[in-house]
Image (cartoon, rainbow, N blue to C red):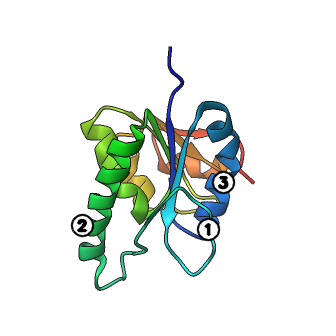
Amino acid sequence: MRQPNILLVSSTGGHFEQIKKLQPLLDKYGGVLVTEKSSVDNKADHYMHMTDLKDKLMIFKMLFNTIIAFKIWFKEKPDYIITTGTMVAYPFYLLSIIFKKKFIFIETFGRADEPTVAGKMMEKHSDLFFVQWESMKKYYSKAIFKGVLY
């Protein structure tokens, strides 16, 4: 029986710091880390273009990121996609639905009293949906609180 292949995906900054806490999963089972290319030296296996909802070029960057995501997907062949968000995770979220792979969303530690746009969108098809604050359970029907990544 082959080991599961894990894809850890996050944007830069705090999301990346949180997802790095799951490095022991990659060490044990195998897989790769995907993040955005930025001026910060984030060590990852694959990089995508940085964008957000306020970016005027967001649609174009997301289209380009989707192409990159397809390349990563077919190279790495993930069984599990785990993300702390945000925009960089959308193409992988959609691919996990299309290819029926397990998708695990971890709501950011930075939100203790309000749901994120990413969380609201990705909860529906998430196989597991974790929040890092007990108070966040009221916003999500599938929320599981097990503590924090930090």
Give the residue at x 32% y 43%.
Answer: 74
Badge 3: residue crowd in 10 Å (few <14, some 14–19, many ≥20)? many
Amino acid type of the residue tagged 1 in the rendering: Asn
Badge 2: residue crowd in 10 Å (few <14, some 14–19, many ≥20)? few
First-in-chain label (3 vs 2): 3
Name, please, the residue furthest toward the bottom.
56
| In this rendering, position of residue 126 left or right of residue 21 | left
| In this rendering, position of residue 70 left or right of residue 19 | left
The answer to whether residue 110 of the structure is visible from this angle is no
First-in-chain label (2 vs 1): 1
* Relative depth, front residue between 6 and 56: 6
Label 1 – label 3 distance at C-alpha: 10 Å
Q: Are marks 3 and 2 in contact (CB under 8 Å)?
A: no
Instruction: Residue under label 2, please give it.
Output: 63
Q: Position of residue 79 (x, y in %)?
A: 43, 32
Disc number at residue 20? Answer: 3
